[in-house]
Amino acid sequence: MSFRVERVTPQDELFFDYLRVRYQVYCLERGFEDPLQHPGGIETDKYDAHAVHLAAVEEATGQVVGCARIILHDPDQENFKFPLEEHFALDAPLRSIDRDCIGEISRLAVTKSHCQEFQIVSKLLDHLFLESGRLELTHWYAAMAKGLPILLRRRKLNFFKAGPDTEFHGTRAPYTIDLERMAANSSHFAYYQPAGEERVAATATA
């Protein structure tokens, strides 16, 4: 099957399909969120207003089958905290990094019916790198279950543990990654090109 990834906003027709996929995965399939707290069959939270949203779309049907977002710092919100900072004890918070250069990756998921289509996650990651370069982000936060960092390391995506394991939708731990350092040492970051530099890939079309 062929898939594409689109950046979606609340003004786009696909945006509510994207939120419905989040509801399907996080409320129904995984049980991470309470369906009763998300009426109308959509899953959303306070961070959506200040995030970049990506939808993986099946070309043949136009169906949204995957999702991801980058939560950005909100300079207008006093004492803003990323979700990772709210829910985990961080041994190594990114205190020395400009907050506007940090993004938190979350809601990265594929529907159960398409979970064997590994290219979907790969395409979502490509676009997360692309958007991060466009936004001039240098670091990511992410919360991950134990097995995921191991799988990502096989792709030479080396996230660093930033705090102890915590019970949060199962056992999770906080991680960080230095995008600029990784981009200099791994071909997997070909789509990460900070604004103002010559882009290797202006669009992720694979």
Image (cartoon, rainbow, N blue to C red):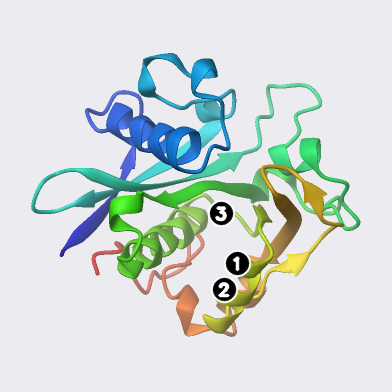
Q: Residues within 10 Å of mark 1 (few under 14, many from 20)?
A: few
Location of mark 3 (residue): 136
| Image disc number at residue 148 | 1
| Residue 107 at least partly seen | yes
Position of residue 46 relative to residue 159, above or below, is above
Q: Are marks 1 and 2 in contact (CB under 8 Å)?
A: yes
Q: Residues within 10 Å of mark 2 (few under 14, many from 20)?
A: few
| Image disc number at residue 152 | 2
Position of residue 178 relative to residue 111, above or below, is below
Q: Please give the name of the residue rendered at 63% of the width and 76% of the height, measured from the top-left corner.
A: 150
Q: Residues within 10 Å of mark 3 (few under 14, many from 20)?
A: some
Tell me where residue 108 appears, x and y as whole percent.
48, 51
Q: What amino acid is at disc 2?
A: Leu
Looking at the rendered image, the disc whose residue lies closer to the viewer, 1 or 2, is: 1
> Hey, which quadrant is residue 165 in on the image?
bottom right
SS of the residue under disc 3:
loop
